[in-house]
Image (cartoon, helix red, strand yellow):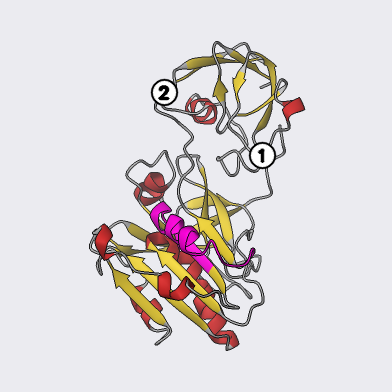
Amino acid sequence: MTEEPASRELVVVARRALTPDIAEFTLADPEGAALDPFEPGAHITVETPAGAMRRYSLVNDGDAPATYVIALKREADSRGGSASMHAEAQEGTRLRVQPPENSFPLVEAPSYLLIAGGIGITPIQAMGRALQARGKPFEMIYCTRDAEGTAYRDEVAALGGKVTIHHDGGDIDAMYDFWDHFEKPTAAHVYCCGPSPLMEEIRAVSGHWPEGRIHFEDFKPVEVVRADDVAFTVRLASTGAVVEVPEDRTILEALRDAGVRTVSSCESGTCGTCRTRLISGTADHRDMVLMDEEKDSHIMICISRSAGGELVLDL
């Protein structure tokens, strides 16, 4: 199994409600030590109180941070991430946090178009503040259902006339019309973060733009469990213990529920941290990491399952 990424323990020093279902958390070192710097668009991976590893975009300035500020929505179908953060992460709670990473960095460009939907405003507003501070031209479009559910509404509005905040009331016919921004390709770089319908709309209207000009950060949770999944068992080679994996849980979650300590990071089959040797059994591989020649001997336990029968793992 891959070694667990370096992490440190941080404490929740402040928490505030941004909307009825979005909360902001401010994390700091318990001893007041400096934190690693980061650029706009960066995220941290947090081990939530339930043990799940989740990635959250950083909202604050990252030049010399004394804190990390994140905001997250309580998802109705949460699998131990947002639900446990909202329920259990109070001021004084200590959480394991991995260093900032950035898969959504700002590149140098003549101008920018920033597009956010819902909780996708977290990296987008950080980009807007950074571009304003640098004197770079940009526009921002922030789409939400209604004013009550608009996180950071005042902060975004304070960026000035460059910003449009649009409420659709949940009516698909009232969605923002992006075509005027995309009809004729420009030299601008576009950064978009939000739910699937927004991402699909931007992909559709920007298909004729030059490659590399449109950048996405997708907050849609990966489909780790499917409707036709069935229960199976895994056997731990080191002890012979058998763990039942229900149809609605992953191997990683079932092991965690059984008190078996494992390492993980993305929990979406993309980072390789939870790579585990498969001693016997046939896996249903759903990751994006393993090479074909590795699939008979390894499995990503955060997302892959049994293709039928018991799996024996080198744990």
Q: Left or right: where does residue 144 sit relative to residue 171?
A: right
Quadrant of the rendering where the C terminus is positioned: top right
Q: Residue furthest right?
A: 293
Give the distance between the C-alpha atoms of the residues marked 2 and 1, in whole angstroms: 26 Å
Mark 2 or 1, closer to the camera? 2
Residue 274, can we see it? yes
The spot of residue 41 in percent (x, y) is 57, 66
Q: Is 123 left or right of 197, judged from the image as shown?
A: right
* Magenta range: 191-212
Give the residue at mark 1: 273
Tell me which numbered mark, 2 or 1, is placed earlier along the sequence. Answer: 2
- Give me the residue at 57% from left, 28% from top: 304
Instruction: Give residue 264's quadrant in the image.
Output: top right
Relative to 231, does residue 39 appear above or below in the rendering?
A: below
Residue under label 2: 228
Q: Would you say residue 96 sits in the magenta stretch?
A: no
Q: Residue at x 41, y 55 (%)?
A: 195
